[in-house]
Amino acid sequence: MEEGADFIRVTPPASPAHWQAASIHTYDDHRMAMCFSLAAFNPAGLPVRIEDPKCVAKTFPDYFEALFSLAQTRTSAIPVICVDGPTASGKGTLAAVLATELGYHFLDSGSLYRITALAAMQAGLSLDAAHEQAIADLVQSLSIQFTEGRVRLNGTDVSDTIRTEEAGMNASRVSALPKVRLALVDLQHGFRQLPGLVADGRDMGTIIFPEAALKVFLTASAERRAERRYKQLISKGISTTLPSLRADLEARDARDSSRSVAPLKPAQDARLLDNSDLTVEKSVDLVLDWWQGKQPFSAI
């Protein structure tokens, strides 16, 4: 390796046999991050991890976005972490934080069903079997974007609209329609992009990404989940009661776990995580530890 006043030159190994998977600590040096990131194009096809990649912001904030726009790789080689679980288990929060920590894309699949239900109702379609094909056809024309924690449907911010209790119940109804679920499969697969994806839902590890390297099934007691949802709704000024919330959660659990198509259940190789008594931070640390254990390089 040769270091100059404003550059670092690294001569790669002579043959693929000499390459090794590696995790590079940048020491907050943007040149290290940029230079060693090119090692990801190594002829041996081995993975390379850049620690603290945000240091490139000093000179080239969009460096990795530009790099990924040029990179080509097999879709199956793009890492995926699945976080599945019942309503109000905290899977959305966990998945979003994981995506941020890892710099991965985020897929909130539950939002897709909520958005589809909203779009169907806006189009005058009832959420039942009689309108199943029409709703499935409607999915093909939807423009859905997840941007900076907000959700947009055909250019309109629907983040708050799809987070109501009614929207949640409607999502469960539309998700029970096989043709609609099939129409959304390709859409969900499209979120699998470099450098990786954290997918949150109910069937990410069993149906959508069965080959994912890490599958987490997150749960908590019905009592604790009802308490969390109660605090969330009260903070938004929405009146409700703990008994009614618990009854709704248990009813939805029963419906989701007994449906004929993609019932709610952990994948056979999923890691089970009961977060009834865990903070978000502890849950995140635990899953990151599991993820690190699957990497070809050790943590630094």
Image (spheres, helix red, strand yellow):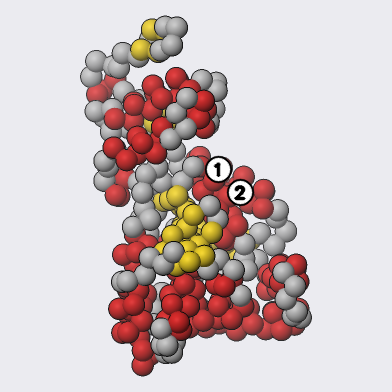
Residue that lies at the very extreme toward the front in this rendered image:
155
Q: Is residue 126 left or right of residue 229?
A: left
Q: Quarter of the image for the N terminus: give it.
A: top left
Residue that lies at the very extreme toward the bottom in this rendered image:
130
Residue 20 figure quarter: top left
Amino acid carrying label 2: it is Val
Is 251 placed above or below 162 here?
Answer: below
Quickly name the residue at label 2.
284
Coordinates of residue 175 in the picture (x, y in percent):
44, 78
Is 176 placed above or below 37 here?
Answer: below
Label 2 – label 1 distance at C-alpha: 9 Å
Number of the label disc, if any, that sits on residue 101: 1
Q: Quarter of the image for the C terminus: give it.
A: top right
Name the residue at 55% across, 66% down.
159
Secondary structure of the residue carrying numbered label 2 = helix
Coordinates of residue 203 in the picture (x, y in percent):
44, 67
The local crowd at label 2, few if under 14, some if 14 to 19, many if 20 or more residues have their Cα within 10 Å, is: some
Residue 77 figure quarter: top left
Which is nearer the eye, 294 or 138?
A: 138
* Label whose residue precedes the other's in the sequence (2 or 1): 1
Number of the label disc, if any, that sits on residue 4: none
